Amino acid sequence: MNQNISATLLFNLVNEKYNVIKSQLPSLLKTLSENNHKAKLIESSTLHESAMDLANILATQDRPIWLNEIIVRTEEFTSKHKDNDSIVSGSSWALLQALMEIYKPALNHNWNFSTQEGKHHYNFDSIYQKYREESDLETLFNTLINTLETMVSSGEIDSITAINSLKELIDILEQNKSSSYFSTMASWEFVKSFTCNLIWEQLDSIPGIKPIKKAFEKTMADTDIELKELHKKIADEMKSKYKVTIQNTLTYKNNKLLENDPEQSNSN
């Protein structure tokens, strides 16, 4: 699943831009059949911009034929009309015919990045890695690991179950302290779940462990703050790079990166 994280995120961005085109294309076809030249120019230019917005977040080989056709035909139509008063005979009819030919595939396109060889062009993972390396996340994970190791080696805990659970937590943090986005977030959710269970609560009853436990929880709070800042930086760059407002696609709370994944929605 972690191999498809960036493709899933970009699916949401692509789908948002694609939905704009799906609404504008039928409107332009209707306008082209009417007698309002100014409206034709405006709607053709608007569709061209929307098509370019979508094309700009796709690798060249991943752009469907209908998308390239929209870009070429609308640009051609605009170039023939330098102002609102210039009317080239037959140009509206030619654009209408060209767009009618790609109408069905344009409105019924299936974006499936999980099977496309071009999915490595979507660089969410590299953006995440860049900001992760600039953050204190690995240092905080190491502090959490060291604190847990202090608990285990203290000799204060006589429960084998508790010791084994703490060792498991150490292993998970160690394995994922510098891993992919999905692995990091999955391990962090595990840590938060662990600190809500009975074993963790019972550590408060051990005088020598209680202050260590509080230190661990303080580092957890610091890690939460760092993760929120990391997500903000990633989201800001994605908004800037792909010129899109990201809603519910990339948020830290409850690990909602995949909130808009249609496959997940269908499985619920």
Image: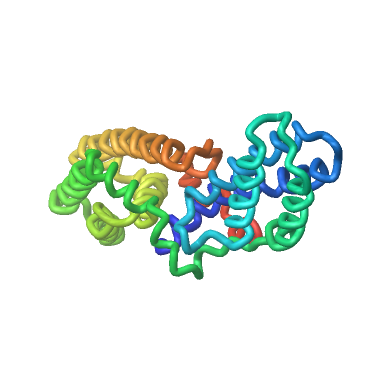
Q: Which quadrant: the C terminus?
A: bottom right
Using residue 87 as the reference point, say whether residue 109 is left or right of it: left
Q: Looking at the picture, does residue 217 appear above or below residue 26?
A: above
Q: Nearer the viewer, residue 140 or 18?
A: 18
Up-down: is 14 above or below 161?
above
- Say which residue appears at 21% left-offset and 51% top-offset: 157
Q: Position of residue 207 (x, y in %)?
A: 21, 38
- Is residue 15 or residue 73 the one in the foreground? 73
Q: Position of residue 231 (x, y in %)?
A: 39, 39
In the image, taking residue 72 as reference, residue 149 lies left or right, namely: left
Residue for point 54% across, 44% down: 53
88, 186: nearer the viewer? 88
In the image shown, does 229 or 84 lie closer to the viewer? Answer: 84
The colour mode here is: rainbow
Please tell me which residue is depicted at 63% across the width and 63% down the height of the picture.
110
The residue located at (50%, 66%) in the rendering is: 114
Q: Name the quadrant of the N terminus.
A: bottom left
Q: Position of residue 183 (x, y in %)?
A: 35, 57
- Dividing the picture into quarters, in which one does residue 247 lie? top right
Residue 47 visible, this angle: yes
Looking at the rendered structure, the number of numbered marks drawn on it comes to 0
* Residue farthest to the right, as pictured: 34
Give percent across and percent down for residue 146: 16, 47
Residue 170 in which image quadrant: bottom left
Residue 194 appears in the picture as rendered: no
